[in-house]
Amino acid sequence: MDYFNAIILGVVEGITEFLPISSTGHLILTSKILHLTETEFLKSFEIAIQLGAILSVVVLYWRMLLVNKNILKQLTVAFIPTAVIGFGLYKIVKKFFLGNSDIVIWALFLGGIFLVIFELVHKENNAKDIEKLEDINLKQSFIIGIFQSFAIIPGVSRAAATIIGGLILGLKRQTIVEFSFLLAVPTMGAAVAYDLIKSAPAFSSDQFIFLIIGFVVSFIVAIGAIKFLLAFIQKNNFVAFGFYRILLAILFMFFIKL
């Protein structure tokens, strides 16, 4: 890895973290395109730079995270399923899933089909759908957390899983999108901390510099991505992202050799 690679991966992470297209999947495929050697550091890098994108949520929503006790309870409950499943399967996921482009491509493809079909059949009820984050109950929070846990498979997309779960439960689109932003803080914060505790002692000083670069770039880009998505959902659903996932998967299946 060099500085250019760290910047490119930081940009990719910042753009994709909160969109329903899988940031981890995009990082894995981008690393393949850049011909980066699949090392333990690269796998940890792809996890750790997500902390930069997560920090953008803290900056934009810090007041809500610090003051609103109900939302903190909701996030804690929603985090539980992912924590149990993620930590339990950590070694398996890192050894066999991260870096596996075949898993990513098929997850993007099948997830894209599911997203398109879901949006075509899903009907929103403006009169009954939950509009405020504070109105999400703990049972709904836990179910959203279960949906999020599917994203341990690279290419599924944490954002897509949580958003679909929330829409099924009757949350308004903006409400579940913002809840997905906030849920990323404990989820990815814990994932990054756990991985760094396991892996950081083996990193060289140069590798830490690459991590810092990726972190800073992803933070800056993610702020723009969050604002884009909030504006996008005012007039659009996620069908376009579903088709994007399908087309990207087909592109890698048949035209781009990894």
Image: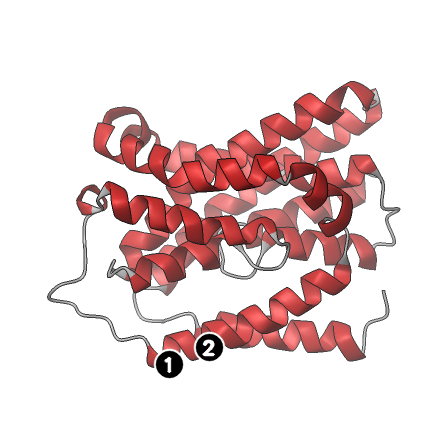
Looking at the picture, does residue 88 appear above or below residue 180?
A: above
Position of 66 with respect to 8 (left or right) is left
Q: Residues within 10 Å of mark 1 (few under 14, many from 20)?
A: few
Q: Position of residue 191 (x, y in %)?
A: 58, 34
Q: Are marks 2 and 1 in contact (CB under 8 Å)?
A: yes
Determine which residue is flagged by label 1: 120
Q: Quadrant of residue 63?
A: top left
Q: Position of residue 127 (x, y in %)?
A: 11, 66
Residue 7 appearing in the image: yes
Residue at 68% over, 72% down: 249
Task: Give the quarter of the figure containing the N terminus.
Answer: top right
Q: Which amino acid lies under the numbered mark 1 shown in the image of this protein?
A: Leu
Residue at 17% over, 46% down: 135
Viewer-side residue, 179 vs 169: 169
Position of 208 with respect to 240 (left or right) is right
Label 1 SS: helix
Q: Which amino acid lies under the numbered mark 2 shown in the image of this protein?
A: Val
Q: Which mark is residue 116?
A: 2
Position of 53 with respect to 227 (left or right) is right
Task: Give the quarter of the figure containing the C terminus.
Answer: bottom right
Residue at 69% over, 67% down: 105
